[in-house]
Image (cartoon, rainbow, N blue to C red):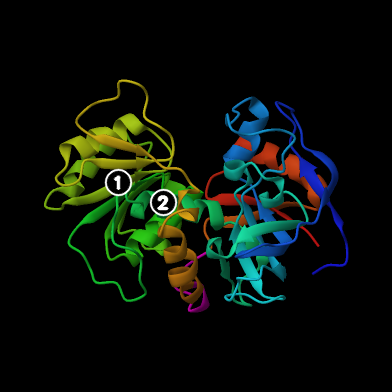
Amino acid sequence: MTAQSTQIAAWQYENAPALILGSAPIPKPQGNEILIENAAIAINPLDWLLQNGAILPWLTFPLITGSDVAGTVAAIGPEVRRFAVGDRVLGQAVSTTVNKSAEGAFQQYTIVSDHMAAPIPATLSFADASVLPLGLGTAASGLYGETQLALPGPSLAATAKDAVVLVWGGSSSVGCNAIQLAVASGYTVFATASARNAGMLKDLGADQIFDHAADTLIEDLLAALRGHSLAGTLHATGSLDDCAEIVARAEGSKMIAATLPAPEGFRDDVKVGHIFGTSLKDDAVGPMIYKDFLPAALAQSRYQAAPKSRVAGHGLEALQGALNAQKAGVSGTKIVVTLG
């Protein structure tokens, strides 16, 4: 445990247009918690949405937000057996779910539950590792959650299944992880993306990639799906209307797990489940991913940290610029800030 009692953090005030640097206590991990000394922090849309008035109703401000960390274990709670001080890890921080600043990413030290963290090999940089947690957790919750697609979990020795998982918005952070997880569950994956990102998605294991901007997208996908059955569809980003049209007309599952809720009165020939990206902290999906699958998959180079990291700056003072860059739009990359 660090001898310090306080740290620097980037605080989000209610409806404030920018993060404000200030001090915060360094918390002591309890129970099954670990304390991570952050070396890299990745940025997600929620981080800047909180500055645009999209306030989650249960949050109280000021709050330390942020979801994606990678770094070194600085201390462990008394119930932790998986990790030791000094281990290199990635972790999914959940302050915006539990309303606790100690569990936010945007600071020097972050509390993470041990079943929401995974060791990372020496060959994987902290910057690259940090792109994974929230995208991975959201994809896993959509694919495997009991109220979502409820597919069989991933394995390094998966049995091939005669069905297709459709990933809509495959080059997004959620999409890149959904592709890899679905492949690791034995499914053939079809994905939509821009043409320039098709090669990246092929490398992640997608069997066929469809240009989301093509005028013939719906008919092209329906033609490719003939003779196949949909095991389920994960909608990460893009047109939910087009996605639902394909699911309604294709064979197989009519269930779509989506990162955003369907609009009121949406069509009734498909079912759209809204993924909550941290639900895996409270169900079997968390340990399935962070304990049983990801450590070995990363160690054997069987899982990629995707999309690629793009370092936007160094130090907590670079976070607001990183949020602004994410808000301006990214494609095929994830914005990261390094620390230390």
Work out whether residue 221 or residue 132 is closer to the camera in this orientation and state it.
Answer: 132
Mark 2 element type:
helix
| Image quadrant containing the C terminus | bottom right
Give the residue at mark 2. Answer: 141
Taking 107 as reference, is 95 left or right?
A: left
**Most distant residue in the top direction:** 265
- Packing grade of label 2 (10 A; few <14, some 14-19, many >=20) is many
Q: CA distance from mark 1 to mark 2?
A: 13 Å
Q: Position of residue 143 (x, y in %)?
A: 35, 53
Work out whether residue 115 or residue 155 is closer to the camera in this orientation and state it.
Answer: 115
Residue 69: name its quadrant.
bottom right
- Dots 1, 2 in contact, CB < 8 A: no
Location of residue 192 with respect to 238 vertically, above or below: below
What is the three-letter code of the residue carrying label 1? Thr
What is the three-letter code of the residue carrying label 2? Ser
Q: Position of residue 117 (x, y in %)?
A: 57, 64
Mark 1 element type:
strand
Q: Most prominent secondary structure in the magenta stretch? A: loop
- Residue at 59% x, 38% y is 46
Work out whether residue 313 or residue 280 is closer to the camera in this orientation and state it.
Answer: 280
Q: Is residue 293 magenta?
A: no
Give the residue at mark 1. Answer: 233
From which residue to which does the magenta span run? Answer: 298-304
- Residue at 58% x, 65% y is 114
